[in-house]
């Protein structure tokens, strides 16, 4: 673990917080958690899918230009997610509910946190296994299996699209996430190098004096501080180390 300046004082203070009855652990997770379950991390793969840049298949413009290609992109992601299993990082996060009130705010659209047993998961970027109406965004439907096709329509007759927040769209759950983070007693980042906004900005809403742990092989720049601790490991290894710290 690579500490920021003042780790000894911070570690002692952190221990006192736990003994004093730490309650709310808020966790921000990213693609690095799902990657260890075999799901593609497109940022690390050059942002490409089948020769297309992700922006070409994950924007409102892409949907209007070629909805069939967008549907196929998410169909393939769904097929992969159905084959994937939660990994040790997912399971440790679920087990931490025995010690803390855990809320996971995830940038991931898969359901691996839920399948691992986590009870409170906020999906910032939508849910892979849901569709929604292109006419009325409040009409949301579960997707059974992996396929969503052209001609699949909502009850009002409009084409269904993936219930995903695309590049260039507002993030509806952002205000909810900010409220959750602002009430945290301990903040943990796992599997994201904090370069994707607005999610990366959630760190700025952690209350002063609340310890922040960042688990990711890439240490983000400009995030050092007296209450910030880095664990430069992949999600599974880093979560083992974090569990030992709070165990």
Image (cartoon, rainbow, N blue to C red):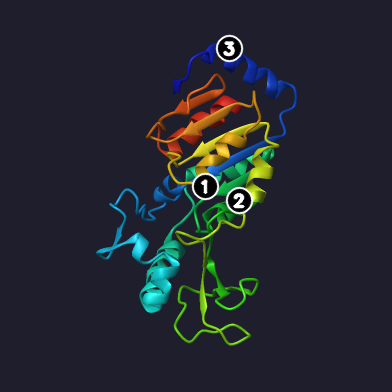
Alpha carbons under labels 2 and 3: distance apart: 33 Å
Residue 27, above or below 77: above
Which badge, 2 or 1, comes first in the chain's sequence? 2
**Is label 3 in a helix, a strand or a loop?**
helix
User: Which class describes the residues within 10 Å of circle 3: few (<14), some (14-19), or many (20+)?
Assistant: few
Query: Horizontally, is 114 left or right of 59 in the view?
Result: right
Give the position of the C terminus as an image quadrant: top right
Where is residue 97 drawn, in percent x and y? Answer: 66, 41
Q: Residue at 65% of width from left, 71% of height from top?
A: 138
The residue to which callout 3 is attached is 9
User: Which class describes the residues within 10 Å of circle 2: few (<14), some (14-19), or many (20+)?
Assistant: some
**Is label 2 in a helix, a strand or a loop?**
helix
Let me know if residue 118 appears in the view.
no
The residue to which callout 1 is attached is 198
Where is residue 160 drawn, in percent x and y? Answer: 53, 78
User: Which class describes the residues within 10 Å of circle 1: few (<14), some (14-19), or many (20+)?
Assistant: few
Q: Which mark is residue 174?
A: 2
Which badge, 2 or 3, comes first in the chain's sequence? 3
Residue most toward the left?
51
Which badge, 3 or 1, comes first in the chain's sequence? 3
**Callouts 2 and 1 close, C-beta under 8 Å:** yes
Alpha carbons under labels 3 and 1: distance apart: 31 Å
Where is residue 84 drawn, in percent x and y? Answer: 43, 58
Where is residue 12 drawn, in percent x and y? Answer: 61, 14
Q: Residue at 63% of width from left, 39% of height from top?
A: 26
Q: Which mark is residue 51?
A: none
Q: Nearer the viewer, mark 3 or mark 1?
A: 1
């Amino acid at each position: 673990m690579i500490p920021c300046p003042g780790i000894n004082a911070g570690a002692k203070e952190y221990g006192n917080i736990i003994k004093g009855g730490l309650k709310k652990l808020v966790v921000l997770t990213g693609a690095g958690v799902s990657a260890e379950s075999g799901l593609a991390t497109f940022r690390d793969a050059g942002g490409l899918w089948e020769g297309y840049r992700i922006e070409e298949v994950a924007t409102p413009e892409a949907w209007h230009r070629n909805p069939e290609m967008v549907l196929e992109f998410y169909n393939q992601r769904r097929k992969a997610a159905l084959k994937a299993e939660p990994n040790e990082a997912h399971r440790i996060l679920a087990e931490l509910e025995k010690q803390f009130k855990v809320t996971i705010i995830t940038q991931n659209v898969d359901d691996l946190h839920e399948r691992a047993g986590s009870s409170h998961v906020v999906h910032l970027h939508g849910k892979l296994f849901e569709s929604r109406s292109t006419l009325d965004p409040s009409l949301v439907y579960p997707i059974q299996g992996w396929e969503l096709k052209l001609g699949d329509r909502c009850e009002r007759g409009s084409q269904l699209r993936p219930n995903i927040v695309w590049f260039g769209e507002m993030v509806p759950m952002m205000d909810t996430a900010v409220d959750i983070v602002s009430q945290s007693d301990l903040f943990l980042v796992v599997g994201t190098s904090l370069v994707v906004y607005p999610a990366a900005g959630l760190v700025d809403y952690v209350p002063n004096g609340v310890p922040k742990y960042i688990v990711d092989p890439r240490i983000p720049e400009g995030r050092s501080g007296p209450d910030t601790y880095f664990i430069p490991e992949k999600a599974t290894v880093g979560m083992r180390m974090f569990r030992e710290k709070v165990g």
